[in-house]
Image: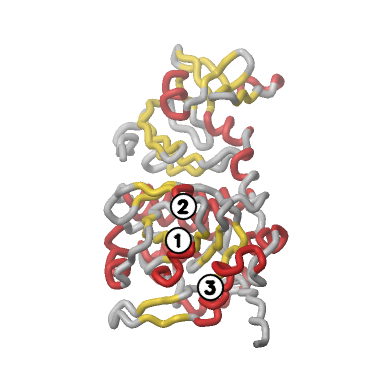
Amino acid sequence: MREELKARNFEVVTVACESKGTEAALPFVQAAKQQHPSLLDEHHRMPELYNTKNVPAAFWIDEEFRIVRANDPIYAQRRNFQTGEATTNENYLNALRDWVENGPRSIYVQDSAGVRASVGKQTWEDVQAMAHFRLGVHLHQLGHAQEAITQFKKAHALRPNNWNYKRQAWNLGDLEKDYGVKNFMDAMKEPDSQPFYPPLQLPDPPAR
Amino acid sequence: MASQGSKDSPFAATVLYRDRSTAVSISEKREDELWLTMRDLEATTGWEVKPEGVCRESICVPLPVDRQDRFVREIDRSRRLNLAEFARLIEQPYAHDEAHNVWYFGPAGWEWKERLVSQQAPGFTLPDFEGRPHSLADYMGKKIFLLAWASW
């Protein structure tokens, strides 16, 4: 996708939110033979700045460095880690192509109200939860796994709908033993944890 | 990262401030109070206590006149600022681990409240998988497809 569009003044930047660091993400990066800037975000800095609460989360940023589409819970293309096989989300990829072609005239571009609605407003609870999460990651990296769990639980209690904080903590520890979560699917359905993903509002392509 | 401030020394603390870790000495452990000497305050946070308030670069935060002693005190013959109280004043989130006396401080209220109020994309600098730093702003002038992902 990037190869197709890069001649059109387009770049892909991916951010791996991985507090385990390189070891967790690198196999995926290598399997995908990524050519674009592929960055590692151990402390979830980008989700903090963009107010995202789960992955994937995609943003379109125009030439003037303005967000013109925000927080799409989607991969344009994903690759099976084992087989290396790529699956493309054609609807989404076509929308992206349309934006690269038509810029602000693309029907997929959001106005400032649309962008704001997609990212939401950061609250005191969001940033408090972030502080507990960050401290948890630091403690985990220092080898204080139990104390890290205490901080992660505080983050989860403050912001039950922040799936980055939950899924990352579960990944660093043990879902059932450390967090009393029987299984992922049940946790997804808990009312105070909703939504798992924000809605994808992609207009229908124009009839041809 | 510094690992000082462990439970072995009750008079040591680790302060994570603007994502930098500094080991400091404190007079005593107290929940919700972190009294830093003027020297530690500046080394850890960049803040300095001046007659007009607590100042860093072009910002000066006046301390509430009626409760100055909750912010600045002389303890063990050193003048100190309670960084936790100051954080509450400037709406800065923080978290504290008592066992190892590690404190994390996030952005001040005037920083996090400004986020995403306009369509301007927040910039950041992160390493690639070889450790080389990249800034999102390096790609300014192009259309950027920015994607957060994870293995979990």
Q: Which mark is residue A97?
A: 3
Q: Which residue is mark 2?
A: B139
Q: Amino acid at mark 1?
A: Glu
x, y percent for residue B143: 52, 59
Instruction: From the top left corner, tell me how far across and down residue B96 is, in percent.
Output: 47, 42
Q: In the image, is residue B4 above or below residue A178?
A: above
Disc 2 element: helix
Residue A17 in the image, given as x and y percentages of width and height? 41, 60
> Badge 1 is on which residue?
A11
Q: What's the distance in space between the residues labelled 3 and 2, CA to CA?
A: 18 Å
Q: Which comes sooner in the sequence, label 1 or label 3?
A: 1
CA separation, marks 1 and 3? 12 Å
Residue A45 visible in image: no
- Quarter-wise, where is residue A207 in the image? bottom right
Q: How is the image coloured?
A: secondary structure
- Classify mark 3: helix, strand or loop: helix
Say whether residue A176 is visible: yes
Q: Residues within 10 Å of mark 3 (few under 14, many from 20)?
A: some
Q: Is residue B88 above or below residue A92?
A: above
Mark 2 chain: B
Q: SS class of the residue under badge 1?
A: strand
Along the line of sight, which residue is nearer the eye, A91 or B24? A91
